[in-house]
Image (cartoon, coloured by chain):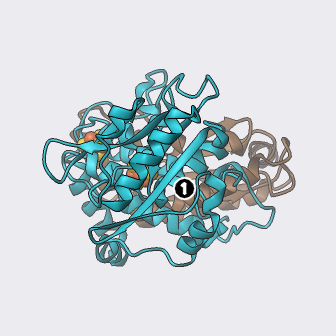
Amino acid sequence: MITQEKYRTTVKELLANGTIKMAIGYRPGSTPDRRRPLFIRTSEEADQLVLDSTCITNLSGYLVTEGLLSDEKQVGIFLRPEGIRSINILAAEYQLNVDQIVIFGFDSTGREVRPLQGRNAGDFSALLTEIKENPPLTSKEPLLERVEKMNAKERFDFWQEEFSRCIKCYACRQACPMCYCRRCIVDSNQPQWINTSSHTLGNFEWNVVRAFHLSGRCVQCGNCDRACPVNIPLRLINQRMAKEVVDGFDHFAGLSPTQEPVLASFKKDDTETFIL
Amino acid sequence: MSEPFEPKIVAFVCTYCTYAGADLAGTSRLKYAPNVRIVRLPCTGRISPMFILKALQKGADGVLVSGCHPGDCHFTHGNYHARRRWMVFRALLDFTGIPPERVMFSWISAAEGSKFADLINSVTEDIRKLGPFDQYQELITETESPATL
Ligand code: SF4
Ligand code: SF4
């Protein structure tokens, strides 16, 4: 509550003195444990702001809305550490200018919400390094271990079972802040890379491609998991891939706004034990 | 089933090294397994993981991707980028249940005609031992769009 009140005041101040033209935060949703995005432009709107432990959506995707940042004015946004990482990635991929982003950082343990120190993406590097060193365990850990232990055939069956439910609604893509391409590979039909039918084949290809494009970019915010109407554990694949790039290339996505994207860079001595 | 299984293998190769290596194998009259379909591309950096999925989608039992040795890329570092991408993509395929033995990577230079012939032979043998990629082909059958490889 105190954090919420403090932030309401801060947002009002920054709006009044013209530092930011808008702040993106949360407001009550359709049920007590749901939140909706709130776009604050006036002091009255700031009074609707809610900040509690149920504010879990990573809002950073709204920042790449076409035209939002083209007037070079600043925009404020409420972010958890994962959100701050996605800002860094978006900046590193030249999708936004970090100087235009005013961060209202927060995190929560249990129901307790606490503010994070800092306003600009660069201010959080100590915090992010700390997360890199001690990544928080997710609820998916046991499942990840189970899947890792399977043999190839079992894994194939496991994922076919999961993917067979996919209805290709692309909610996972829309919800992900890292999926900002104007034209997604599934939308192109010349050539048609991915089978459009919702047969398991097309679903498999879609989910593999999605996971590949997010390898070394996913920040584990969980937007995709929550958006999927048929509860496919999408984040699990990305979690596995995140581990791969940390182990293989010491790359923890979103550490700083100037970090080179892992698949757009290379070292001459990268491992190649698998190459014949 | 008295006939031995003849695997279908798709090889994506770069034009400057591996394709030239294959050419050398041919002009040197080296004999190698006829199971491989070669697709020539400008550079390994141009070999998108989509190609590998497409090959499987069309019924391939195995895929080979090959290009210039590190340091030899015609475009100086296309193969370095490709190498990172493959490593990640390979882990992804492994995690989603595509056996890594079915998707192979190699470096073959324009002078390595015999390496090319040997590799094609050994790859064909390996895939023959693994047998057809039934699990994937069931998915293709389900879509009622038959393989056109
Ligand atoms: S893939 Fe999912 S968890 Fe990862 S950044 Fe995108 S929405 Fe968040
Ligand atoms: S949100 Fe779920 S059902 Fe929709 S396309 Fe993504 S994986 Fe498929």
Say whether residue A157 is left or right of residue A144. left
Ligand 1: does it lie within 8 Å of the C-beta at label 1? no
Q: Which quadrant, please, contains the N terminus of chain B? A: bottom left
Q: Is residue B114 above or below residue B26?
A: below
Q: Position of residue B48 (x, y in %)?
A: 59, 41
Rendering colour (chain A)? cyan
Q: Is residue A3 above or below residue B54?
A: below
The quarter of the rendering in which ligand 2 is drawn is top left
Please name whichever residue, B60 or A69, is drawn nearer the observer in this view of the structure.
Answer: A69
> Tag 1, which secondary structure?
helix
Say whether residue A194 is left or right of residue B50. left
Q: Residue flagged by tag 1: what amino acid is it?
A: Arg
- The residue shown at (13%, 47%) is A31
- Chain shown brown: that is B
Q: Can residue A180 be seen from the camera position used here?
A: no
- The residue shown at (76%, 38%) is B15
Q: Position of residue A118 (x, y in %)?
A: 58, 58
Say whether residue A245 is left or right of residue B140. right
| Protein chain holding label 1 | A
- The residue shown at (38%, 40%) is A173
Say which residue label 1 marks.
A85
Sort mark 1 into few (<14), some (14-19) or many (20+) by Cα contacts within 10 Å.
many
